[in-house]
Image (spheres, rainbow, N blue to C red):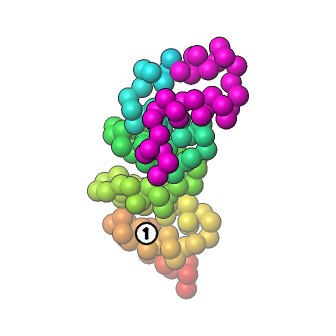
Amino acid sequence: AVVSTQSTGELVLQVAQCTQKDPKEYLLFLNEMETLDEHYRRFRIDTQLGRYKLALQSLVKCGGRFEEVCQYVTQHSLHSTALSLTSGEEHRKIAELYAGLLKQQGSVEEAGLLYAQCSMPKDALTCLRLTC
């Protein structure tokens, strides 16, 4: 909620204060931020501030960056959040990523259910067999 009421300039200033960048580095950062579209700028700023869920929301809004979304989701363990922000084929792919992670972690029943939702019956059956 705070991010929606803050201007981008305020957020950039907050990044500078939190990261204690050298003034030369800060100027480079500021110049780079000016070249980015609004959603990607907010993504970068929220990432710098450690606000990963908010950053993911902005990244999803960018559109056309789904590979980056997948990497970010995996890096910051934001699968549940990503599922609530996506739909269609993107939602299915995030669910597939999450199912793979759950299977790796030993939560095979949950993984099986997610694979079933993703229309991946072989993977779903494999996981569900492991629960017996």
Quick one: 68 or 21, which is closer to the camera?
A: 21
Displayed quadrant of residue 46: top right
- The residue shown at (58%, 16%) is 27
Q: Position of residue 36 (x, y in %)?
A: 42, 25
Quarter of the image with the C terminus in it: bottom right
Residue 27 belongs to magenta span: yes
**Residue type for callout 1:** Leu
Residue 31 is one of the magenta-drawn residues: no
The answer to whether any part of residue 96 appears in the image is: no
Relative image position of residue 4 (x, y in whole percent): 43, 45
| Residue for point 56% across, 66% down | 103
Residue at 45 percent across and 35 percent down: it is 7
Residue situated in front as seen by the camera: 66 or 39: 39
Return the residue found at the far left.
88
Q: Which residue is mark 1?
A: 114
Residue 91 image point, x, y percent: 36, 57
52 over 94 or under it: above or below: above
For numbered disc 1, what is the local secondary structure? Answer: helix
Q: Is residue 122 above or below residue 64?
A: below
Nearer to us in this view, 108 or 1: 1
Q: Is the magenta region chiefly helix, strand or loop?
A: helix
> Where's residue 14, x and y in %?
59, 34
On the question of residue 82 being in view, the answer is yes
Residue that sits furthest to the bottom in the current view: 132
Categorize mark 1 by other alpha carbons within 10 Å: few (<14), some (14-19), many (20+). Answer: many
Counting every numbered tag in the picture gives: 1
Q: Which residues are magenta?
A: 1-30
Between residues 59 and 98, which one lies in front from this camera angle?
A: 59
Name which residue lies at 36% across and 69% down: 117
- Position of residue 10 relative to residue 125, above or below, is above
